[in-house]
Structures are given as structure tokens and as C-alpha cells.
Image (cartoon, rainbow, N blue to C red):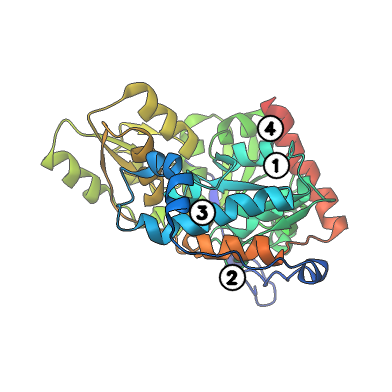
Amino acid sequence: MPITGIYGPEDFDQPAHGHSPVPARGRANPAGRAGALPMPSLEWTPEVERSTAHLYERVKNVISPLEWPLMAPTIKAINELKKTRGAVILAHNYQTPEIFHCVADIRGDSLQLAIEASKVKSDIIVQCGVHFMAETSKILNPHKTVLIPDSRAGCSLASSITGADVRLLRERFPGVPVVAYVNTSADVKAEVDICCTSSNAVQVVESLNAPTVIFLPDQYLAKYVATQTDVKIIAWKGACEVHERFTGDELRAYREADPTVQIIAHPECPPDVLAEADFTGSTAHMINWVRNKHPKRVVMITECSMADNVQAELPDVEMVRPCNLCPHMKRITLPKILDSLVLLREEVTVDPLIAERARRSVERMINLKN
Ligand code: SF4
């Protein structure tokens, strides 16, 4: 059914909203600075070539032999430092192939990373993704050190809403439960009833057994969820700056150029885009769809590094790659991951009182899954 209404900061009589597109900088861990390790050698040598050859096998379809000598010494250094530090690297599906396939220990979408973060044994987590993902790991691991290689890695969805906005929505719609997409700050997670990801959004909305649910902050995911359930949805005016750039015309042009091509899209895209797609699903669902269907040619309507990562795994599937990059995800690079491990920076912190309330919303989602 159509969504019941879409709200934004301008719909409330309140002081300046004060959203920042970029989260506050993290900080170098003072203890870590004291414990900084020497920077390893980053020379391309026969030994580096030999010891990283198995990793190059994983990415040779998407990284050229000319590029590899520039990356391999840093990859080797990161993998050695991970052991020295006892650290684990979590990488989102939108990370570039050299990170995703060559240094990450745990890979996945937001839901998979949140679940795995809750089970991590290592004392140090390096989050290769954006800031709200690192915050989620910290919320679930309050006694561990969570590092993000560049704390300026924000998200247009996370910066579209604050905890104060959620409180105003609750005043406007008393008694209506609130679901927050995980692409939100800890401050927002602390104010809501439960979190969701694009993998489980419909399941989470229906789990509340309520006739109406406030679903925030992604208006397009809210519209998609509304097409899949009888629950009435009240939405927020947030959008992903990467997925809202796709258009239905663009998808029709792909299909006109090749009527046999398969088109799969992420539900953060606008409705006219989803109407043209053969399949709609989260990043994890899109990857599984390609693995299972094994189409000859596929267009992945999402952040473009994911197509590179799937291409590395499935070289015989031809990927058509409309290249919409997420500028925030691309702030995470191999040299910054290395710096993170050498200097133990930038540490992500969450106020313990906010973290405790936010943890309830995230764990309620994880427990639903299990
Ligand atoms: S791709 Fe969109 S939702 Fe994901 S981090 Fe970037 S801006 Fe946020």
C-alpha cells in the first residue's frame, strides 16, 4: 500500500536541525599512540610477490598485473600486523576488491557485519565501511577497541536524522512503534524500538504486530517495504546519495541495448528504478541471486565496487557496471587501514548510556534473525 506520509526536519517547529554530512572525527587512541608500531617496509620484492600470489589469484579479474605491485606490499603488511595486534577486519560489500578479498576477515552487508561483530573474539576490530557501521560494532562490543581507518566516512542517510528528530516524531505519532534502518547514528538507534537492514526490513516491520509503523530514515526503502506489507508506513525524507541517482530511464536503456540482460537493484533506489528491475534485494540478496542464477549478463544497480567484488568471484558472469561510487566508502583505503593498525587509530567511541539503549534496538533485530 502507499506510504501514509513522509516527514522531514522542516515539518517540526524546532531549532536549526544541525545535521552534519560528516560525523565528528574519531580520535587516535592515546594508549595506541604510545603503543605505535614501526611502519613496515612497503617495497615490492620477490618475497612479497611470492607470499601474496594466492591473494592475487582472488582479484586477478579486476586488478591488473600493473596495479598489483603497488598494492601487494601494503596488503602483506596489513595481514602481518593483524596477527601482531590480534585484530580482525570487517569489510562491507561496497569496499574495493583489494580490501574486500585480500585483507578482510569478515565480509558482508550491514546485517551480516552486525551479527558477526557481536561474535568477534579479537580485542581490536578494524571496520572497513562507514562510521555508523563502526558505531554498531562498538555498540555490540563496548569493551573492545573499534577503529575506523577514516572517521570522515559518513553516510547521507545517517546524517539525515538525529535522535531529537525521532523524539519529535514520537510526539507527533504517540504509541506508533519506530523502526530505524541501521544506517543511522547511535543517537538515533537509542531512540527507536528496533533496527533493521535492507535484508530484513519487511520481517522487522511485521514483527511489531502494529497497524502503523514509523520507518526511518530512507524514504525509498520505506516505499519498497510498503509494497511488501499491509502495515501502514510513516517515512522520513532521507535518501542514499548513491542509489537515488539511478533512474528508470537508465535501466530501460540497458534493456533496450540488450533485451536478455538481467537487472537487479537495491531497495534504496527510487520506485521507478525498482519497477524496471528483475529482482530487488539487499546487497547480500543480490550477491546470492547472481551466485544462484548465474546469468550471462547482469546489471547491478548499487554501489559499483560490489560488482567488482562479485566479478572477482564469478569471472564467467558479465557484469555491466553503472559506476555510482559511494564517496564515503571510498575514503577507506589500504594505506589508511595500515595506519590504523600501526597507530591504533581512529578509535570510535559511543557514550555508554546511549550505547546501552542503542544496543537493545540492534540486539532485538539480531535476535529476531536468529
Ligand atoms: S552507499 Fe548510500 S547508504 Fe551506503 S554508506 Fe554510501 S551514502 Fe550511505
What amino acid is labelled 1 in the image? Answer: Ala
| Mark 3 residue's CB less than 8 Å from ligand 1 | no
Residue 300 vs 292, above or below: the answer is: below
Q: CA distance from mark 4 to mark 2?
A: 34 Å
Upstream in sequence: badge 4 or badge 2: 2
Q: Position of residue 74 (x, y in %)?
A: 51, 59
Q: Which residue is mark 1?
A: 117
Q: Which residue is mark 3?
A: 75
- Indicate the secondary structure of the residue bearing disc 1: helix
Q: Nearer the viewer, residue 75 or 270?
A: 75
The quarter of the rendered structure image containing the C terminus is: top right
Q: Which mark is residue 22?
A: 2
Residue shown at the point (79%, 60%) measured from the top left: 350
Q: CA distance from mark 4 to mark 3?
A: 49 Å
* Disc 2 residue crowd, few under 14, some 14–19, many 20+, Cα 10 Å: some
Q: Is residue 252 left or right of residue 215?
A: left
